[in-house]
Image (tube, helix red, strand yellow):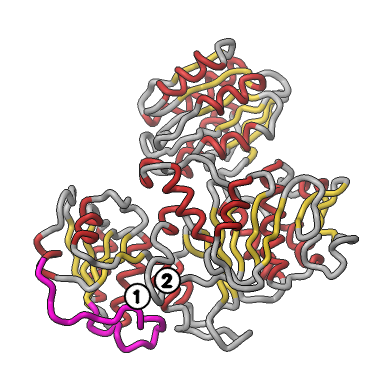
Amino acid sequence: MGRHVREPDLAALTSWYAAGWKGLKVAVFGLGKTGFSVADTLVELGSEVLVVTQQADEERSRLLEVIGAELVVDETLAEAPARLLEFEPDLVVANPGFPPSHPILRWAQQAGLPVWGDIELAWRLRDKVANAKSGGPADWILITGTNGKTTTTRLTATFLAAAGLRAAPAGNIGVPVLDAIRDPQGFDVLVVELSSHQLHHVNRHPGGELRPWASVCLNIAEDHLEWHGSFDAYRAAKARVYDNTRVACVYNKADDETLHMVEEADVEEGARAIGFGLGVPGPSDFGIIDGILVDRAFLDERRTSALELTTVAELADAGLAAPHLVANVLAAAALARSYGVETGVIHDALKTFRLDSHRIELVATSDGVAWVDDSKATNPHAADASLRAYPSVVWVAGGLLKGVEVDELVAAHAGRLRAAILIGRDRERLRQAFAAHAPGVTVFEVDAPDAEVMPAVVRYAASVAQDGDTVLLAPAAASMDQFADYAERGRRFADAVRAHLSIDS
């Protein structure tokens, strides 16, 4: 690729108001929700934008034309399109859907082009709107982990907002960070949920290093290996969440790997390591004493005292008593307390907090059998946490396993399974795991058209479930082989349950 003479100083682009954005030639890879927010932002800054994607819906394609960005659609993207070569970008901003091994990212690397993600771009532009609290840009609190990210992000933002702060959840949770930093009213704090795909691209370029107020990796287990290429690469991406943290690095006391990440991180002077766990906490920890969730980190007498947050009994009333959800509450409380939120505010906010749909959501109870939708359990680690919440389970599992193993999961829970119902493309691997590790468990397989999968699941489950059982949709796999996403999978399960039980939705 021939390079044009102009070599912009990208390291100087650390403000919305930097002059260098105007005329900058940027190739944006991908046109999902994140990709469009990137293109829209850059056009607003006066950059020249070429969007390169394998697919584009009609509405976003039309909007790109309206705002003045150019679009190239290539269904294979097996190599850099001719228009991309001709465009000669100064910079690439990659959508999280593009793995490092993708041909056009390899092309960008070989061409010597810097590759940013939307998170780095948003960090550089975060001063567009000043907040009322400090007159500067919003502070960022970063949340990642294999599981529990969205619940912990929503909890943290809820606690901050209850304290009177302008706070918003953003990032992988659904609202692109670039949309949040352009909100004309501004925020005091952004609680940013980060996937490993997004973290892969952060803290790689001068001027773009994130400096969060607080950060957490909730847990780490095999996931997205097909994207990262190995567990080590996946773990390295997750560990980036702690880099340059200013006040509090929150880690999971039940997951030593998260503590090792904190120990390895290059943080700002004075940043503290704050542990959370379901046991009795030590000084600088959050934990549980006699059924009471407590803070022993953010008080002067932390070696001899603790501050009460709530009780396990109160969490049960809010549907938050499953062990992994209690851990999420403790992590979110630690992040909020690091920002000065009072314990009483956290206690009161928890009374009205409710989980997202498809996260351990009770669909119905009939004849002593509970039907539970945890379609959001899209990997073995999440399914493990869900299964542990129930003593006797008819387990609905399967889908796209994303390169991870399921033998340990099946072996760990064989004793609590009444039966298993396997769905999805990768059910052969699950079948083999049951044969090897749970040969006594009754296993059904659903081989039906997509529209008939969940009615068949419910018929099988109803044939074996007994009083005291939970029929649990916790697939340990992604959904896109048979459903649009985990939400559609959960909705179809719930609809099939209600139809079988003759319950109006």
**Residue 295 appears in the rendering:** no
Please give the name of the residue rendered at 70% of the width and 68% of the height, measured from the top-left corner.
338
Is residue 15 rendered magenta in the image? yes
Instruction: Please tell me whether the stretch drawn in magenta is mainly helix, strand or loop.
Output: loop
Q: Which is more toward the observer, 223 or 113?
A: 113
Which secondary structure lies at badge 2?
A: helix
Label for residue 178? 2
> Which quadrant of the figure has residue 141?
bottom right
Task: Point out the image quarter for the C terminus.
Answer: top right
Amino acid type at image mark 2: Leu
Task: Tell me the distance, in whole angstroms, between the alpha carbons under discs 2 and 1.
Answer: 7 Å
Which secondary structure lies at badge 1?
A: helix
Q: Which residues are magenta?
A: 1-24
Is residue 330 rendered magenta in the image? no
Q: Residues within 10 Å of mark 1 (few under 14, many from 20)?
A: some
Q: Residues within 10 Å of mark 2 (few under 14, many from 20)?
A: many
Q: Position of residue 460 (x, y in %)?
A: 53, 18
